[in-house]
Amino acid sequence: QVQLVESGGGVVQPGRSLRLSCAASRFSFSTYAMHWVRQAPGKGLEWVAVISYDGSDKYYADSVKGRFTISRDNSKNTLSLQMNSLRAEDTAIYYCARGYLSGNSWTDYWGQGTLVTVSS
Amino acid sequence: DIVMTQSPDSLAVSLGERATINCKSSQSVLYSSDNNNYLAWYQQKPGQPPRLLIYWASTRESGVPDRFSGSGSGTDFTLTVSSLQAEDVAVYFCQQYYSVPYTFGQGTKLEIK
């Protein structure tokens, strides 16, 4: 069964940085696009970013563009999200999810998420 | 950006009855070159990540009970639960993957009446 395990969440002050990781296993990681999706406490889902299977293409939500960077290491089956200049509104559970297709696609497997709290 | 609007925000249905959730996109998510609607539905139970139910607007994911069905095309879509079971209590989200950003609807909370 596909496994996605996020880590790296925690409490961080506004303006600081945090790096999230997602360890993937039990599937051929290097052949799938990967997404980050977040959910503020008690709120809906917000798509954050996607990276193509080989890392050549990356797209972001306007709310994080220029502050967040998605990346992957296919040799280590790991997806990352570097978050800079964090704001209170970035507080959320961050999920990594697998894109079923290499192009525009739904997400078929999700991790359990890691909580990021931005607070002074 | 494509805006996804769900209705209603919450819905209470009796066990065994039909539940219908609507999703409207601000522009068509039907891709003319392949005639597919780039629309998915997810179910999220408390404390859990979302679970994929439907993709291509009407294709049920493997393992999803057949009481869940999706329909619609272009800008108007529907998720139907034909006979509500207790385990279907959850929040349901639609998402378009036609173009980035891949936006979600605000969610519909489904409860037992």
Image (cartoon, coloured by chain):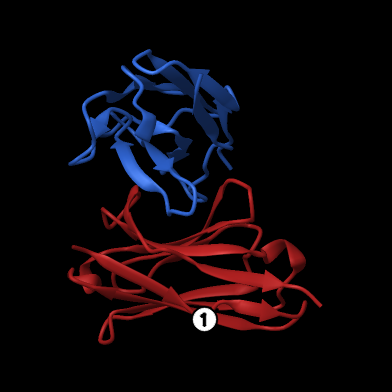
Chain colours: A red, B blue
On screen, residue B36 above or below A7: above
Question: Residue B7: horizontal and vertical position, in percent?
Answer: 56, 23
SS under mark 1: loop
The residue pinned by badge 1 equals A8
Q: State the residue lying farthest toward the right.
A: A120
Front residue of A50 and A116: A116
**Height in image: B7 above or below A115?**
above
x 77%, y 77%: residue: A14
Q: Residue at x 52, y 50 (%)?
A: B101
Q: Position of residue B104 (x, y in %)?
A: 52, 42
**Left or right: where B9 falls relative to B16:** right
Q: For this view, does A70 lie left or right of residue B55?
A: right
Q: Residues within 10 Å of mark 1 (few under 14, many from 20)?
A: some
| Whether residue A84 can be seen here | no
Residue depicted at 62% across the width and 65% down the height: A65
Amino acid type for the residue under numbered disc 1 = Gly
Image position, residue B8 (x, y; %):
58, 22
